[in-house]
Structures are given as structure tokens and as C-alpha cells.
Amino acid sequence: MQRVSDASVSVDGSETGAIDAGLVAYVGIGRNDTERDALWIAEKIAELRVFEDAEGRMNRSLEQHGGAVLLISQFTLLGDARRGRRPSFAAAASGEPARVLYENVGIVLETRGVRVAYGVIGADMEVRQSNQGPVKILLDSERTF
């Protein structure tokens, strides 16, 4: 996820989602991911303290800060480029299972009162963002790093 001052996503020249200050969350759904993983990621996005408090320290969460989330599905995050020159995406979920878990991340955030804008799963998207900080945090529900 990336802290931003603003961000938007377009498909075929039409804007499908935009936010002011908040986070852009690039979400890669793996073949073995479950509802539990989606919940864990959504909670981390909402609760991780990546926004500055009055003293300039990263001490405030998205919920405390009041920002929004631009949620972008991105299977390429599951790309494995350890061997050869072409990444393998075999670990990425596809189709309906990926869509359901991606949407569930957004639903959990919305139920917590976070405004969520969405990309279009499976589409060729153009994402524009003004990085703030820059602050970029990698989250993995399997905790592999």
C-alpha cells in the first residue's frame, strides 16, 4: 500500500475511481488465499499507523486520519521472477475466487467506515497517484517477508 495525497484509476479513458488523501492498496490474491486472508489485509489497511500525528510521527491509522482507499487488483504482485526472464504467475488466483476476495477486502473496509474507490478487476488500468512521503508498506497475509 502507498500513502498518497490523491489518486485515480481509469479504464479505456474513463475514470472508475478516485480519492483524495489516503492509501492506494494494490491487492494480489493468491490461489491459496481465503476469507481470513482478505480480512487480515483489510484490517491492516485500516489500522496500520502510517499517517503523521501532530508531532510529525507516523502514529495515526487510516481510520484515525479519515482518508480513503483506492483498491486496485494486481495479480502481478504474485509474479515469481526467481528463475528465467519471464515471471510466472502460477501462484495468482484467477476468475471468480480472486474477484470475491478482492471485493471482500473493500467490503470490510467500507463496513469500518472507510471510503473505498475501486479499480476494475481484470482490466488494463491506468493508475495515477501522488505519493506522499513516500510511504510504501508491503503486507503479506502469509508473512513471507
Image (spheres, helix red, strand yellow):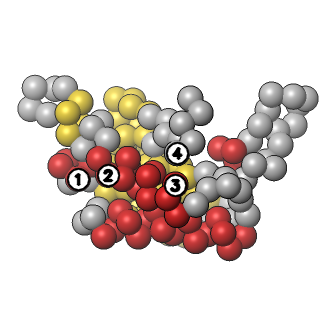
- Residue 57, x across and y down, in percent: 19, 26
Q: CA distance from mark 2 to mark 4?
A: 15 Å
Where, quadrant-wise, is the N terminus in this rendering? top left
Left or right: residue 23 compared with residue 125: left
Q: CA distance from mark 3 to mark 4?
A: 6 Å
Left or right: residue 82 compared with residue 108: right
- Which one is in front, 39 or 59? 39
Placement of 81 over or under 23, stated as above or below? above
Q: Earlier in the sequence, mark 2 or mark 3?
A: 3
Question: Which structural element holds mark 1?
Answer: helix
Q: Earlier in the sequence, mark 1 or mark 2?
A: 2
Residue type at mark 3: give it. Answer: Asp
| Residue at image coords 37%, 40% | 3
- Residue 15, x across and y down, in percent: 50, 67
Q: Earlier in the sequence, mark 4 or mark 1?
A: 1
| Residue named by callout 2 | 46
Q: Earlier in the sequence, mark 3 or mark 4?
A: 3
| Residue at image coords 36%, 43% | 4
| Residue named by callout 3 | 37
**Residue 63: which numbered mark, if any?**
1
